[in-house]
Image (cartoon, helix red, strand yellow):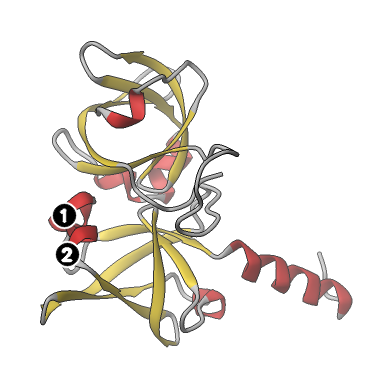
Amino acid sequence: MFTGIVEEKGRVVSFVQGSASWRLKLSAKTVIEGVAHGDSIAVNGCCLTVTDFDAAAGTVEFDVLEETRRLTSFSALNAGSAVNLERSLRFDGKVGGHFVTGHIDGLGVIEIFEKRGNDYYMRVRAPKGNGRYLVSKGSIAIDGISLTVAEVEDDSFAVWLIPTTINVTNLSEKHSGDPVNLEFDLLGKYVEKLTAFHSGRAG
């Protein structure tokens, strides 16, 4: 479980296909402090398991399934790409965003990304039919960043971003047309499931 509060912006060292899986190697500082094999780290909002690390060199590695690469923005990662990193939630820690599972619901595409005054406006198109999970003032995780939905129109939604968010995350390197990982609010998905169950439509 995560909060959607990005701890640092890491960089892809390499992302290569191995015999059993894809191997993702990142450079980082904060998230590898006290890290252990098997720990969970959200990379662009996707929960991955630490398989190797070198604290002295400042690198951490993960195995990535082909399905994960195919269904997320990982397919666009290359050496040098910026990634958002967050360690899993500690029970004695603060929850500054909202509960984020690290399980990506779909791939969004940035439609508009521009500075308006001192802040930034970003409009994203979600996969078809996923607009039902979006509500104004509700929560959304974009590349693992906990954000508040400002506008909703069908399957598109907009968020406002403060300069700090731009500076500390990979959004500083995003442009219109770029893919982003989306995780919708868990509460909305549970409500949908329970509503379907009580109406006799549960699968």
How many marks overall? Answer: 2
| Amino acid type of the residue that numbered disc 1 sits on in the rendered structure | Asn
Q: Residue furthest bottom?
A: 153
Q: Which residue bears the numbered disc 2? A: 163
Question: Do the numbered discs 1 and 2 sit on residues whose CB atoms are within 8 Å?
Answer: yes
| Amino acid type of the residue that numbered disc 2 sits on in the rendered structure | Pro
Residue drawn at the location 82% of the way across and 69% of the way down:
202
Can you give x and y, in whole percent of width and height, for residue 174 in the image?
17, 59
Residue drawn at the location 48% of the way across and 51% of the way down:
3
Q: CA distance from mark 1 to mark 2?
A: 6 Å
Relative depth, front residue between 135 and 112:
135
Can you give x and y, in whole percent of width and height, for residue 20 in the image?
45, 19
Element carrying mark 1: helix
The C terminus - image quarter: bottom right
Relative depth, front residue between 136 and 17:
136
Q: Is residue 124 visible?
A: yes
Element carrying mark 2: helix
The N terminus - image quarter: top right
Q: Residues within 10 Å of mark 2 (few under 14, many from 20)?
A: few
Q: Which residue bears the numbered disc 1? A: 167
